[in-house]
Amino acid sequence: MEDQIYRQELLDIIRNPSNRGEISKPDLEARAVNPLCGDEVKLQIKLKSGEIVEKAVFSGNGCAISQASASLLTQNIEGKKLSGIRKLKGNDILKLIGISPSPSRIGCALLSLEVLMEALGKVKS
Amino acid sequence: MSIDVEKIRTDFPILRREVHGKPLVYFDNAATSQKPRQVIDAISDYYSHYNANVHRGVHKLSEEATAAFEGARKKIADFVNAGDGRQIVFTRNATEAINLVAYSWGRKNMKKGDEILLTQMEHHSNLVPWQILANEVGAKLRFIEIDENGELRIKKEELRKYLTPKTRLVGLVHVSNVLGTINPVKRFIEEISKFKIHNSKFAPKVLVDGAQAVPHMPVSIQNINPDFYVFTGHKMLGPTGIGVLYAKKELLEEMEPFLSGGEMILEVDWEKSSWNYVPWKFEAGTPDVAGAIGLGAAVDYLNSLGMKNVREHEKELTAYALEQLSKIQDLVIYGPKEVEKRGGVISFNIIKNGKVAIHPHDLASILDTEGIAVRSGHHCAQPLMKVLGIPAAARVSFYIYNTKDEIDKLIPAIEKAKFIFKVD
């Protein structure tokens, strides 16, 4: 089981995560905490012409699964339209990180999606 | 005399199961304990043979159920040396017992400007109810700090520093669920009662949270002499859904009910009602009869082992685990180093260059694949995690059925996690 959860690519991401950091004056920003473990993810997004994600970054701390999924998700949405991003579902995130966590760990994997949706909720449409 | 662990293990059906193809190693006893056949049978026997509502029926089954329910109350009172059963109120758990005190005693006796003194090592259950009360009445919370050994930073003379003439309540955990620290509650309560003579008209009332103490060591409430003492059944071999509030009789007499309805009344008219005698005044509605009977059976089981022996067994396991764990490079253990000062709870992290190198959740997932159940996270003590400067910790906690062999399985499993996460 652990070979699936902690596959090598995921561990490499943890050691050197892409899109980790903060940007000044983001257009969108949201933060959430997983009450189960205290995992924390903050996402910041810079938009181009109001509807395309130009840059997305994450910060916070938590377990390998929550931090890797935040890294992969922020990479994934760059260059995409908000309308498309809004359609992302939990399964898309699991596909992105390529694992199927046990029920108690699903929340870790989906935390960054939750934060992303909250950030998108702040867009004036 | 010591306990016969191999014999004990045969009493616990769950210990025969496998997890991920490996024999279960259950090290999450501070969260909840497993249940022996004797407890499961007592509950099933009640439902199979004398299930009835208590107190009101005059038929045979109701009489039997009432006798078993009240008999359990008496057994539990004897187990913690709490006088007659009249000072034992059944609640759902320790959390509800604390909420009962905050609601029924707190709202009547606390006012704006009063102070509640807690410690930095309280579980959320002995923090949040007081936050709500403090916000409601305008009272202030103060906290006794912990030192680098995970003990309360308090010498005899320093306790006075925290107490003021406005301190109305002191909330104190008996054994910390994170650090394992056994607090000197008896000495504290003696100090606090002296404070009355010197500085104030009233000594503050003291509530002791014994959720991690009563299951693991001999506890005599009359010897400790708190005003309130709470604990829960499911951490001491009993079922979930049954907890205990002990309070001094005069306090129970003067306190208003917490919940109201059936059971807790003497007389009811359209406009007003009068309250039942204690403890039933605080037990509105049909109580958890099966839960109380199950907890009574758990107490019988623990009595048959002897609580001194239970404590000795856990001390031995804890000493062995501390020794083995400290051989693992980069492993940091929280709480007192001396086994006399701690219960069978060990929280730890893998720390490299000052940072948590394997998040406790990841560590717990890897241990799970080896069949080892440990807790990871903030352990319902988020402010304490901030004091320790960590987001979370992994925790192993022992009970009567755990063995040194099981600890021997834990060590290579942690090394395996370090290997997977390349901590070297």
Image (cartoon, rainbow, N blue to C red):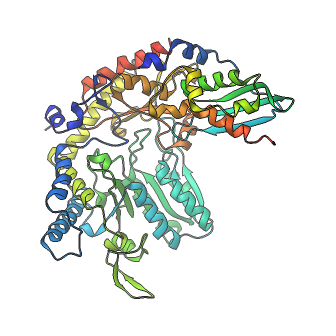
Q: In the image, residue A90 lies at what x, y percent?
A: 57, 32
**Residue at the spot x=48%, y=67% of the render?**
B103
The quadrant in which the N terminus of chain B is found is top left
- Quadrant of the rendered image containing residue B23: top left
Residue sitting at the far right: A49
Which of these two is toward me, B208 or B149?
Answer: B208
Position of A53 with respect to B67 (left or right) is right
- Quadrant of the rendered image containing residue B414: top left
Q: In the image, residue B360 lies at what x, y percent?
A: 48, 28
**Residue at the spot x=43%, y=58% of the render?**
B191
Q: In the image, residue A110 lies at what x, y percent?
A: 57, 32
User: Up-down: is B6 above or below B288?
Assistant: above
Q: Is residue A88 visible?
A: yes
Which of these two is toward me, B90 or A106?
Answer: A106
Q: In the image, residue A94 lies at what x, y percent?
A: 55, 25
Position of A82 with respect to B31 (left or right) is right
**Residue at the spot x=20%, y=49% of the render?**
B39
